Amino acid sequence: MTAGRPTTLTEELTLKIRKLILIGKKPGEIHMELEIPEGTWDSWIYKDTEGLRTNITAWKAERFLGAAEDNMSGLLNSDKENIKADMTKFIFETAGKATYSKKSDTAIDITTKGKQFDGFLINFGNGTKTSELPTEAGGTL
């Protein structure tokens, strides 16, 4: 690519940019290494051409997550039991959250018995509250 000559952001070029981001190159280094004119590069980033700016952010996150996963493997094999326990708990609560999470999405609804709440709630400031509920959900509180 010749300096000053317009460059097209092709899929092939995008994949090269991704590869360089994943090995830790900075965007300013990438445009020089791939001989993309600085004005063209800046325009692509500013205009988010073909989602380039968005993708660069995602690729950086992918690189950081990969490094974190590598660190987790090492920590899980640590001789220090407290680190192993903390890492195991973290992995269960994040990667295994569908199975091991403490959070329950099946909270019991004791006010409307599962019916949509179309009323309103008034707090009178003295500890008393009133609301209108659909009759099938139990009337007025």
Image (cartoon, rainbow, N blue to C red):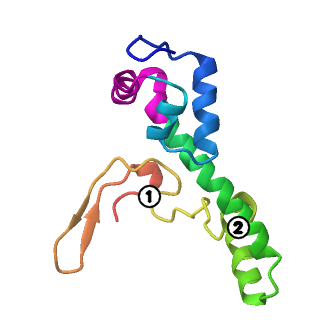
Q: Which residue is mark 1?
A: 138
| Mark positioned earlier in the residue sequence (1 or 2) | 2
Q: Quadrant of the C terminus?
A: bottom left
Say if 8 sits above or below 131 in the image. above
Q: Position of residue 51 (x, y in %)?
A: 47, 26
Mark 1 Cα shell of 10 Å, populated few (<14), some (14-19), many (≥20): few
Q: Nearer the viewer, mark 1 or mark 2?
A: 2
Q: Which residues are magenta?
A: 37-54
Give the dominant element type of the magenta stretch: helix, strand or loop.
helix
Q: Position of residue 40 (x, y in %)?
A: 38, 21
Q: Position of residue 30 (x, y in %)?
A: 51, 35
Q: Amino acid at mark 2?
A: Asn
Q: Between 106 and 98, which is closer to the camera in this rendering?
A: 98
* Distance between the alpha carbons at the discs numbered 1 and 2: 54 Å
In terms of secondary structure, where does tag 2 sit? helix
Compared across the picture, whether 81 is left or right of 132 comes to right
Say if 102 sits above or below 62 in the image. below
Mark identifier at residue 71? 2
Mark 2 Cα shell of 10 Å, populated few (<14), some (14-19), many (≥20): few
Say if 134 sits above or below 53 in the image. below
Compared across the picture, whether 17 is left or right of 123 comes to right
* Residue drawn where x is 71% and y is 60% of the image: 69
* Residue drawn where x is 30% and y is 55% of the image: 132
In terms of secondary structure, where does tag 1 sit? loop
Write down the quadrant of residue 86 in the picture: bottom right
Q: Residue 25: within the magenta?
A: no
Q: Between 62 and 136, which is closer to the camera in this rendering?
A: 62
Q: Residue 47: within the magenta?
A: yes
